[in-house]
Amino acid sequence: MTIKPPAGPGTGCTQLMRGPAKTPSESFAGILQKSIEKINSTCQGHEPLPQSVFPLAVLHTTGTPELALKKSENLLELLERYDALLNDPGVPLKDIYPTISAMEESCDEIAPLLTSLEDTHPLRPIVNELLVIASIETIKFNRGDYC
């Protein structure tokens, strides 16, 4: 049995891997343009689709200063509870851990609110300082500084 090479240029393995040669009208841009035209022709008389949609997280933070203030007050209460538990010698560290977990969750909720506050907003430095203090305390507790 003998294997015969394909006849003519461009009919070898590389041509089979690439597929048939495409014409300029078959390029991605051409296909995309045809699809857009088809969609536009079928949507005549209907309300146009929005060009962009805001993520739900952005919509959730529209009342940012009020929400940041409320969540900051909750974090401050957690910090006060943490301080009281830490200063009580009769409280074991495993009983303090739920408060640490709540502080971490609160920090995760407040961080996006901080970035959405204006730089000149008077609440921004307070929220930032609360986040820093809470983050440092959770790191110190998880690291074992209070064992």
Image (tube, rainbow, N blue to C red):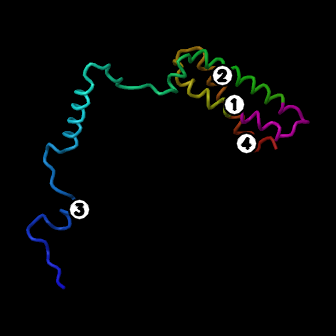
- Residue 3 vertical placement versus 70 (above, below): below
Give the mark nearest the N terminus, 3 or 2. Answer: 3
Quadrant housing the C terminus = top right
Residue at 56 percent of width and 27 percent of height: 112
Residue at 50 percent of width and 22 percent of height: 59
Residue designated by label 3: 17
Residue designated by label 1: 134
* 99 left or right of 32 in image: right
- Label 3, label 2: how far apart the Cα atoms are: 59 Å
- Label 2, label 1: how far apart the Cα atoms are: 13 Å
**Closer to us: mark 2 or mark 4?**
2
Q: Residues within 10 Å of mark 4 (few under 14, many from 20)?
A: few
Residue at 20 percent of width and 36 percent of height: 34
Which region is colored magenta?
85-103
Q: Secondary structure at mark 2?
A: helix
Q: Residues within 10 Å of mark 2 (few under 14, many from 20)?
A: some
**Closer to us: mark 2 or mark 1?**
2
- Label 2, label 4: how far apart the Cα atoms are: 23 Å
Give the mark nearest the N terminus, 2 or 1. Answer: 2
Report if the CB atoms under discs 1 and 3 are less than 8 Å apart.
no
Residue designated by label 2: 71
Report if the CB atoms under discs 2 and 1 are less than 8 Å apart.
no
- Label 4, label 1: how far apart the Cα atoms are: 12 Å
**Amino acid type, mark 1:** Ala
- Residue 30 vertical placement versus 80 (above, below): below
* 68 left or right of 140 in image: left
Residue designated by label 4: 142
**Amino acid type, mark 3:** Met
